[in-house]
Image: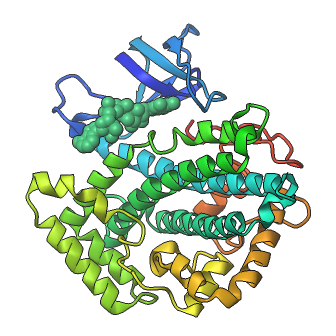
Amino acid sequence: MLTGEKFFGSNAGAEVAVVAARPRGAEAGVRGLALFVLPRYRSDGSLNYHVRRLKDKIGTRSVPTGEVELADSEAYLLEPPEWGIYLILEVLNISRVANSIASAALAQRALAGALAFAEQRTAFGKPVLEHPLLRQQFVDRKVRVQMAFALAWEAVRLLDAVWLQRPRYSGQYHLFRLVAHLAKYWTAEVAVQMATWAMIVHGGAGVLADYPVERLLREAMILPIWEGTPHRQILDGIEVMERREAHHLLFRHLSPDADTRAVDAMAARVDAHLALGQEEKEARAETLRRPGSVCGLDRAPTPAAWERIDAGGPCCPFLRVGHGLGQFHRVHGDRHARRAQRLHDWLQVVAHPGSQQPTPQHRGQVPTLAEHLVHHLGDPASQVFGHDLGIPGHAQRTSVNVRG
Ligand SMILES: Cc1cc2nc3c(=O)[nH]c(=O)nc-3n(C[C@H](O)[C@H](O)[C@H](O)COP(=O)(O)OP(=O)(O)OC[C@H]3O[C@@H](n4cnc5c(N)ncnc54)[C@H](O)[C@@H]3O)c2cc1C
C-alpha cells in the first residue's frame, strides 16, 4: 500500500503508473527509494488514486499533468527494493534520450515551418528567404539542427548498446550516461532557441495562435525542465566524470575523428576543473558544457568531416566534429551556394512530406532501440510527442505518450 502525494504526474489518469516510493524504515536519500507499479483501479474495482487538480500549463496541454494523491493505494513492487535506484536511473536514461530526440525533432519542425513561411512572405520586393541575412541564418540553423540530431542519435546508439546492463556497469555505460546528459542538456536548449528564432522569422504573425510556431515555442519550454533541468544534467555529468572518468572514455570515443591535440587539451581542462574545490567546481561548471567547449575543438573540421555532417548519419555525431562548423562554411564561401541549395532541398522534404520519404538518413542503419523509438515516436523528423504540429500535408496521428 502506498500513501503520499505527487505534485507533478504526467499522463495523470493512466491505467498503470510507475511510482518511486520509500518503504517504511528504508534509508534516507535516493538509495532508500523502491519502484512500484500502481494500477488505476484497486482489485475491488474502485479508483486506486485521486487526481486532485490538473495543471494549467504553458505547453504540453495534450498530456494531462496532475497533482496525484495516494491513500493506501495498491501497488506492486518491481524487483527487490534495493534495486529501486537502478531502475529509476533506467527510466531516466530512456526518458532523457527520448527527450533529446523530441527536442531535435521540434527544432527541425520549427526550422521547416520558418522556411515555409519565409518562402511565401514578401518584404522589400522579394520573398524574405531571398534576403542574404535571413538565408545565411537558415544555413546556420540547419547545421545546428543536424548537430542536435547527431548528438541525440549518438545517445540512442549508446543506450542501445548498454540498456540491458546491470550493476556493476561497464565503462561504456558510464560513457553513455555522460553523452545522455550532454544530449538532454544541449538538444533542449537548441529546441527552445530554434522555436524562438522561428517565431521571429514569422515576424508579428509568429506570436499569433493562428500559426503553428506559437505552439511550437510553448511546447519547447518544457523540454529543458522535465527529466532533469540543465543544472541537474550539468551536476550529474560532473559526477560521472569525477567518479567514473567518463570524460576520458568520451575523448577516447571521439579520438578516431578528432584532432588529438585539441582533445588532449580539453581532457586537461576537464581534469583541472574536476580538481577545483566543490563550490568553484559547481559555480564554473556551465563553461564546460557549452557545445564546442565540450569537444574542445576550436578549429574548423576537415572537409571530410563536413561531408559527414552533411550526410547526417550516426557516423558523424556532433561530438566528433565539434563546433567550428560556422567558421568552416564562412571560410569555404565558394560552397555556400551549393549548401544553400541542399538546405533548401532538405527542408522541402521536411516541410512537404510525401514529396520524398522524410526520414533521417539513420533509418535502416540504427539498431533495435532506435527503431523502437522511431516506431513509438513516429518519424522523429516529422513528429514531436505524437502531436500534429500543423505543417501542411502532415496528417494528425494518434498521440503516443512516450512518458507513459
Ligand atoms: C509539465 C510537467 C510534467 C511533469 N511530469 C512529471 C512526471 O510525470 N513525473 C515526475 O517525477 N516529475 C514530473 N515533473 C517534474 C519535473 O521533472 C520537475 O519539475 C523538474 O525536474 C524540476 O524539479 P523541481 O520542479 O522540483 O525544481 P526545483 O528542485 O524546485 O528547482 C528549482 C530550480 O533550482 C535549480 N536547482 C535545484 N537544485 C540545484 C542545485 N543543486 N544546483 C543548481 N541548481 C539547482 C533547478 O535546476 C531549478 O532550476 C513534471 C514537471 C512538469 C512541469
* Position above or below: 122 against 131: above
Where on the picture, by quarter, is residue 342?
A: bottom right
Residue depicted at x 49% and y 14%: 49
Identify the colour scheme used: rainbow
* Position above or below: 62 against 98: above
- In which of the image's four quarters is ligand 1 placed? top left
| Residue 59 visible in this rendered orientation of the protein | yes
The spot of residue 315 in percent (x, y) is 57, 80
- Which residue is at the front of the view, 84 or 384? 384
**Is 58 displayed left or right of 30 in the figure?**
right
Q: Quadrant of the C terminus?
A: top right
- Which residue is at the front of the view, 181 or 2? 181
| Residue 42 visible in this rendered orientation of the protein | no
Residue depicted at x 61% and y 89%: 332
* Position above or below: 66 against 383: above
The spot of residue 186 in percent (x, y) is 46, 58
Residue depicted at x 82% and y 57%: 124
- Which residue is at the front of the view, 392 or 159? 392
Looking at the image, which residue sits at the far front?
124
The spot of residue 195 in percent (x, y) is 62, 48
**Is 22 displayed left or right of 177 in the figure?**
left
Where on the picture, by quarter, is residue 269?
A: bottom left
Q: Quadrant of the N terminus?
A: top left
* Position above or below: 125 against 67: below
Where on the picture, by quarter, is residue 326?
A: bottom right
Residue depicted at x 66% and y 79%: 310
